Amino acid sequence: MRVAAAPHLARRSVLTAALGGVCCGAFVPARAGDTGDDDWISFRTRFVAGDGRIIDNGNGGVSHSEGQGWGLMFAVAFDDRASFNRIYQWTRRVLRRPDNALHAWRFVPANRPPVGDLNNATDGDIFIAAGLARAGRRWGQPDLLREAAAIARDIVALLVREAGPQLVMLPGLQGFESKTAFTVNPSYYALPMIAELARLAPSPKWDRVQTDGRALMERGRFGKWGLPPDWLHMNRAGGALAPASGWPPRFGFDAIRVPLWHTWQSDPVGDLLRAVERYWSDFPADAPPAWADLETNETAPYPVTPGMAAVMRLTQAGMGLRANPDLPPVASAGKYYDAALMLLSRLAWQERRPA
């Protein structure tokens, strides 16, 4: 989760069989000694504290459930069980909510208490569950599969809502629904991970979450390029969509993950990805603006960050516009979020094109 939530808006064999594979693109662990191993070492050295907390150095040194989930996924991918255990134990001990299997969204080390807001971030819980599920499969730990399944069940039970004929997935438990509308974050529809959770904790709702989520992202596009916003307002009655108030109406640092998830999932190239590519191609190669205002069509006075550029190159490779993403080393990223996007892009390309 990149911004605050509510304050801005007033069993063994069964589980092992269920997780025999990922439904769309097999999970292929990275091999020790390849370039990805160096990337993980760079990320771990700079952003994973000794106790397992993932540090967002571009956001005041805070930690997010999102980052903890990504850290779990990275540690599994590079077979780093020691780091996984540290990240997992910190996450469970510090962020786990007392009333369900979800996690508080943010840890602020300077605050007392550091976890002052128990609201969750749905994307963070999705990534944590996916990391636990992947670890349970790779290392033969049914307990991790059970915990991942508990998170998945609570996501479906507590965060999915009927919105007319479709389902929407709330970004958090509090602050994102009213009597008349929902606020949705399109980038929280992390399609590859949602597909994994659907196999882990089957529910008819998961298919609808994925199908309706794709439709929502296709419909909820704005501005001259037809781009998805970081945050989306959805009217309960008629389902009308608009960029959400309370955040800049931008295709920016959250929405950049929408093409990442579509590419990772190997979805057919549709209007959404073509629109994003049109935006990127309207500017000098590898240097489009970091964001576009979807109401005024104004663009950022600075180019995409290294992590955003990695997602762009991954997406273009997935569309057949590049032979491969030619991703830069993670060591070249100075900030946590850029480094994370680079590693996510590497995992996405690996899982799309298993060795």
Image: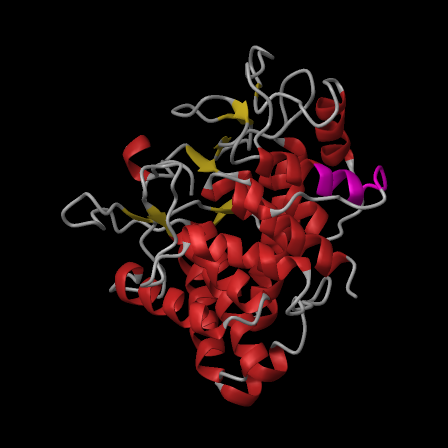
Q: Residue at x 49, y 32 (%)?
A: 231
Q: Which residues are magenta?
A: 313-322
Does the magenta-highlighted stretch encompass residue 139?
Answer: no
Is residue 126 in sight in this rendering?
no
Does the magenta-highlighted stretch encompass residue 314?
Answer: yes
Is residue 77 in sight in this rendering?
yes
Q: Residue at x 71, y 25 (%)?
A: 280
Q: Tell which of 58 and 176 is nearer to you.
A: 58
Residue 312 in picture, x, y percent from top left:
69, 36
Q: Tell which of 35 and 349 is nearer to you.
A: 35
Residue 191 in picture, x, y percent from top left:
62, 53
Vertical side of 33 occupied by 247: above or below? above
Q: Quadrant of the N terminus?
A: top left
Q: Residue at x 59, y 64 (%)?
A: 204
Q: Residue at x 59, y 35 (%)?
A: 306
Residue 257 in picture, x, y percent from top left:
59, 41
The extreme left residue here reads 112
Residue 343 in picture, x, y percent from top left:
59, 51
Q: Quadrant of the C terminus?
A: bottom right
